[in-house]
Image (spheres, rainbow, N blue to C red):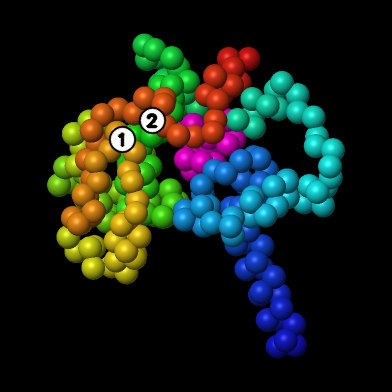
Amino acid sequence: MESASKTTTTTTVAKTGCSTCSTCRRAGTKLFLKGSKCFTSKCPITRRNYAPGAHGVSKRAPRLTEFGIRLREKQKVKAMYGVLEKQFKNYYKKAQGCVGDTGDILLQKLEKRLDNVVFRLGLAKSRAEARQLVNHGHFLVNAINVNIPSYEVSPDSLISIRPKSKDKVVFAARLKELDKYEAPSWLFLDKEKLEGKVLTIPNIDQVKTEVDPSLIIEYYSR
């Protein structure tokens, strides 16, 4: 009985561990949900670049409808930034009310989320980890503790780690991996102090994501 119990536990863990990677395989592109692993040969989409499931290995890929193409693009962006449907739709409505290209503004608003900025600065290995660290109150924005992952930063915002949190293992590990890391051009990273600054609002060229925001706008405009 003990042996059977161990087998069940192992299987459960394996299924849980691959669910994030299955999201990328289903989307057909890397969404960078697991941090540094996404840049290695161990990335599942590199080894198995087809949809998960029994029919994923089929040579004949399912043909998506026009609606399906737009829906998949929306789902990709939601998964990438870790945003639920209601919250994502609110971002779209806010972007729609701004002057300029709605798709570009939508991505800008998602990029300006505090959890995303923490990830882009290299202070967390993934957006999911950044979201958890922000939730636990490990970060300061302009010397004020902010524990809301969706908090929108602005140019000249200074993002730093709370002094009491700097000795934690997770940040010690990040410090070792920052030597070769380059933050996006719209951010400044001080690797020694483990803090960063928002230099400007990112434009669409600085947001390096394999998504087409115009398809998302078409989805909501249907």
Q: Is residue 57 above or below residue 5?
A: above
**In the figure, is residue 129 to the left or right of 40?**
left
- The spot of residue 212 in percent (x, y) is 55, 25
- The spot of residue 66 in percent (x, y) is 71, 21
Label 2: how many residues lie within 10 Å, few (<14), some (14-19) or many (20+)?
few
Q: Which residue occupies 27% across, 56% down?
A: 138
Q: Amino acid at mark 2?
A: Gln
Q: Are marks 1 and 2 in contact (CB under 8 Å)?
A: yes
**The label number, if any, that marks residue 185 in the structure image:** 1
- The spot of residue 70 in percent (x, y) is 64, 25
Residue range in magenta is 74-88
Residue on which the image places disc 2 = 206
Residue 137 showing in the rendered view:
yes
Q: Is residue 20 above or below residue 213?
A: below
Q: Secondary structure at mark 2?
A: loop
Q: Quadrant of residue 201?
A: top left
Q: Amino acid at mark 1?
A: Ser
Q: Quadrant of residue 188?
A: top left
Q: Which residue occupies 17% across, 60% down?
A: 163
Q: Which residue occupies 45% across, 34% down?
A: 208
Q: Secondary structure at mark 1?
A: loop
Q: Is-magenta flag for residue 76?
A: yes
**In the figure, is residue 193 to the left or right of 96?**
left
Magenta part, dominant SS: helix
Q: Is-magenta flag for residue 203?
A: no
